[in-house]
Image: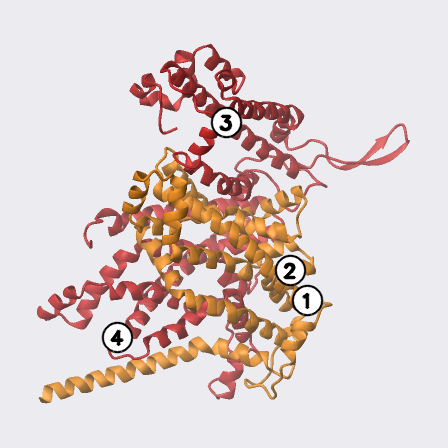
Chain colours: A orange, B red
Amino acid sequence: MKKQKSMSKNKKIKNILSYVILIILSIIWLLPVFWVIMTSFRAETGSYTPYFFPKGFTLNNYLKLLTETHQFYFAKWFGNTLFVAVCSCIISTFFVLSVSYVMSRMRFKLRKPLMNVAMILGMFPAFMSMIAVYYILKGIGITQSLIALIMVYSGGAGLMFFIAKGFFDTLSRALDEAAYLDGATKFQVFTKITLPLSKPIIVYTVLTSFLTPWVDFVFASVIMGDNYNNYTVALGLFKMLEREFINDYYTQFAAGCVLISIPIAALFISMQKYYVEGISGGAVKG
Amino acid sequence: MKKNPLHIIKADRKAERFVLPQVIRNGDAYTKLSILIMGAANLCRGQIVKGLIFLAIEISFIYYMIVTGITSLVNMTTLGTQTQGWVYDETLGIDVLTQGDNSMLLLLFGVVSIVVIILFILAWRANLKSALEVQSLKEQGKKVPGFIDDIKAYFDSKLNRTLLTLPMIGILAFTVLPLIYMILVAFTNYDNAHQPPGNLFTWIGLENFKTILGSGGTISKTFWPILGWTITWAVFATGLNYIGGILLALLINQKGIKCKALWRTIFVMSIAIPAFVSLLVIRTMLQPEGAVNVLLKQLGLISKSIPFLTSATGAKITVILVNLWIGIPYTMLITSGILMNIPADLYEAARVDGASVRKMFTKITMPYVFFVTTPYLITQFIGNINNFNVIYLLTKGEPSTLAYYQAGKTDLLVTWLYKLTVNSKDYCYASAIGIIVFIISAVFSLIAYRRTSSYNNEEEFQ
């Protein structure tokens, strides 16, 4: 009896300790989030303040951000990014699903070599080819345009098939075989049987390719240069922190960050399950 | 390609690789004609559309080669001879600015020509194979499939080709072609002193690699410390994230903890918020006058600002710590599922044998998680070698130093590569570094993958 009591006491201490650690960690984790939200409502402009909590709160930063058009045209950037994201997400999803289905379900002579080539290509740093891509786009004559961005984001998407392939590998083949016996072609099996069963991985692929344009600023900055009209949100926000703008635009930058982060974070958290399945499924298979 | 109708060929599978000897040995007149005139066999045997497509490919290839292809290839060997500049024009009697050769474009066109030639050879092989196929069908007295049948096959037995075509074109144009171009640039002197169109650049062999690896100049004095820091960074970033993530997952998944989903969501916030937002915000927070220093001062914990990002050592520690902020939840997400899937009877058996909690952790949990996540760990390590975002957004590679060429104390190889490309336009060094990074990634993943238990004894935990 006595022993049991001490054990439960031990457990209680352990629990309390765990909660304390979790709370401390949570504060650390949420501090930047809390701070950027607070800054986005800050009434005083300027980048750095000599005190932590703002003296006054206002909605002006959001209003200014959304209505201003001459230097930083945030509303237009938002539209640009949405357009690029939708287009490149459709193309990428189509590419990724096609390639991963083929690599998972079909057997042909070039299958292994192609998969190895994809792996080797993936080991080169992405920025290495950046400047060559730029010159190719310049050669076609479409730099500084949104089409160029769409092509850059979705062009190489076919290489990102490993995770979706891992998922297709786990789907049972019994259904496929049954369909073949009924005289279905491979294309019919792909569109009528495999795809309807693959909702998680389709959601995952759509989501990841939709998010790329919102968070990339490297390729966008190389392609867009100084064409402010065609900037994406990420690139624009990055620009706001440059030395000549940071003092006037810091609170607006914070407001922009909040506006962008809310939908993306919400999407991510609601799709978390698929994301984990995609990553760990792909990781376990290797 | 999978089915090979000629029974003679089936007996000799090795010869399958080379189509030409087969055609010469077994082909009849029409098939042999296809060597020179693509699609001839198809045209003569009733596959009009297919034959015409082959023929069109050949004609357009020949046209391309005559118009630009051959000159492109020749120019690629020299990368241009005529420098842009003022040349005395006798008829006008004054100096005239002449348009010189543009080495950059010459190299690009050369690469395009090579790709076109490779594609043509593939088409030519397909043409020969198709010729053999029709011939054998004719010999066996079977019906030759028409164009409609061919199209149907492309949605059934040859679906792989249909589905792969567009993605492959995309990869070819936006990954392979630029990559070949940049790999070739690594063997030229395309640096900021040789910028077309004003100047020419030319082939210099392995000079760039010699400069980077061991000339004793500033560039190699930049390369080696940066390489060292890249490896240190990758080891710490990967290892600490991994251990921290597993510990956090264990902490949250304890039996006594309530609201597991809430805790998990709090930590996942740092992945859910776009990295460029959170990192830029953290960067401003960590400045000498930034929010963190201000807060610590107001709380009376420090009197002088902590140099989070302004001193070299401080910045290095800071980036590793901030990376934990992003990385730990990531590992936690991945390992949470795995931890819950560890067979409970393993722990039961250990408990019966009187194993301590720590022992169970080191002997059951860690080996199990490690086994399942090894591939993830390897990809993470390589990902960290190439971790552009964290470093560039947080420190921009700074604090800068005069001892380095175009780099700062926290620059990784990839951020240095980026700076060499965007700031100083030393494309040849950037490309050479890209190749070196590739070699490092490839070697690490090969070694690590071969040493892991998941490679050597796959059955152990299944």
Residue receiving disc 3: B123
Compared across the picture, whether A176 is left or right of B384 comes to left
Check disc 4 and report its element: helix, strand or loop.
loop
Give the amino acid at mark 2.
Answer: Tyr
Q: How many marks?
A: 4
Instruction: Reply above or below: B153 against A257.
Output: above
The answer to whether mark 2 and mark 1 are in CB contact below 8 A is: yes
Between disc 4 and disc 3, whose residue precedes? 3
Query: What chain does badge 4 belong to?
Result: B
| Residue B405, image x, y percentages | 57, 54
Question: In the drawing, what numbered circle is on residue A231?
Answer: 2
Residue receiving disc 1: A73
Q: Residues within 10 Å of mark 2 (few under 14, many from 20)?
A: many
Give the amino acid at mark 3.
Answer: Ala
Give the amino acid at mark 4.
Answer: Gln
Check disc 1 and report its element: helix, strand or loop.
loop
Question: In the drawing, what numbered circle is on residue B254?
Answer: 4
Give the amino acid at mark 1.
Answer: Tyr
Query: What chain does badge 1 belong to?
Result: A
Residue A46, visible in the rendered structure: no
- From the image, state whether disc 4 or disc 1 is nearer to you: 1
Instruction: Please tell me which residue lies in front, A261 or B315.
Output: A261
Q: Residue at x 61, y 67 (%)?
A: A237
Instruction: Reply above or below: A58 against B155.
Output: below
Q: Quadrant of the N terminus of chain B?
A: top left
State which quadrant residue B84 falls in. top right
Instruction: Reply above or below: B382 against A251.
Output: above
The answer to whether mark 3 and mark 2 are in CB contact below 8 A is: no
Q: Residues within 10 Å of mark 3 (few under 14, many from 20)?
A: some
| Residue B352, image x, y percentages | 9, 70
Instruction: Please tell me which residue lies in front, B406 or A110.
Output: A110
